[in-house]
């Protein structure tokens, strides 16, 4: 019985600490993480494996949160929020122009600065999930930059590669080994 009470107290303590962290983030008037560079690209070819991508580098490690769909988002919108991140006005204008040029038949992208409920950067991808799959990962460069990379892939090409990979593995399993000297 005593173990459960300690565990319950620990969970309550973690919840209080999380709430305090969120409240301190709301009171932060100045975002801590600056967007340093943003590169995006798109491949218009139908037989391309990777159809696009976005790389964002920051001054500090960004926290990236995938937001659930709401009544305010379009059907195929996938929204990511990077709290306490900021981008300069000039840089945001340049990014907006680059994004407009790179929107294509595979996906569209928008990047905006948000102030409420907390300051941050919102990244919205719009694509057909039947044709495109997306993943993202965090990275550190050899220098001091930290960031996040979003990759969009042609779903039919990925499936075709999976089928070929299975047949290659099957051949490798059943074909006798030969030694080449």
Image (cartoon, rainbow, N blue to C red):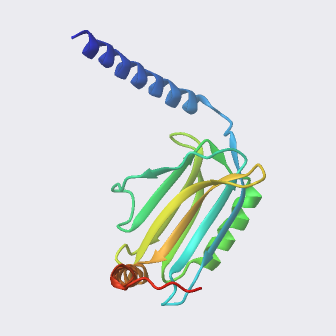
Question: Closer to the camera, 28 or 129?
Answer: 129
Classify 96 as above or below 82: below
Residues 41 and 115: in front is 41
At x 37%, y 53%, the residue is: 68
User: In the rendering, at what x and y percent does residue 139 appear?
Assistant: 63, 54
Which of the 4 quarters of the picture holds residue 122? bottom right
33 left or right, relative to 150: right
Q: Quadrant of the N terminus?
A: top left
Horizontal relation, residue 85 to residue 167: left or right: right
Residue 100, located in which quarter of the rendered image? Answer: bottom right
State the residue at coordinates (76%, 59%): 90
Give x and y (percent) for residue 9: 34, 15
The one of 90 and 123 positioned closer to us in this rendering: 123
Q: Which residue ends up furthest to the bottom in the rendered image?
A: 46
Query: In the image, what residue occupies the spot 56% across and 27% down?
Result: 24
In percent of width and height, residue 116 lies at 53, 42
Where is residue 60 shown, x and y percent of the image? 69, 44
- Residue lying farthest to the top in this orientation: 2
Q: Which quadrant is home to the C terminus?
A: bottom right
Residue drawn at (26%, 9%) of the image: 2
> Number of marks in the image?
0
Q: Is residue 84 above or below residue 13?
A: below
Q: Is residue 42 left or right of residue 170?
A: right
């Amino acid at each position: 019985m005593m173990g459960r009470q300690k565990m319950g107290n620990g969970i309550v303590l973690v919840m209080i600490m999380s709430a305090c962290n969120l409240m301190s983030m709301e009171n932060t008037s100045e975002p801590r993480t600056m967007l340093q560079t943003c590169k995006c690209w798109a491949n218009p070819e139908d037989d391309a494996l990777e159809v696009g991508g976005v790389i964002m580098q920051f001054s500090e490690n960004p926290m990236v949160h995938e937001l659930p769909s709401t009544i305010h988002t379009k059907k195929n919108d996938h929204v990511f929020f990077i709290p306490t991140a900021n981008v300069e006005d000039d840089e945001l204008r340049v990014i907006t122009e680059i994004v407009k040029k790179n929107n294509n038949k595979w996906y569209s992208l928008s990047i905006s600065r948000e102030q409420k409920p907390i300051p941050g950067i919102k990244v919205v991808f719009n694509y057909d999930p039947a044709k495109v799959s997306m993943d993202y990962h965090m990275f550190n460069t050899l220098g001091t930059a930290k960031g996040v990379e979003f990759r969009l892939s042609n779903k039919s090409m990925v499936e075709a590669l999976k089928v070929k990979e299975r047949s290659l593995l099957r051949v490798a399993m059943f074909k006798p080994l030969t030694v080449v000297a």
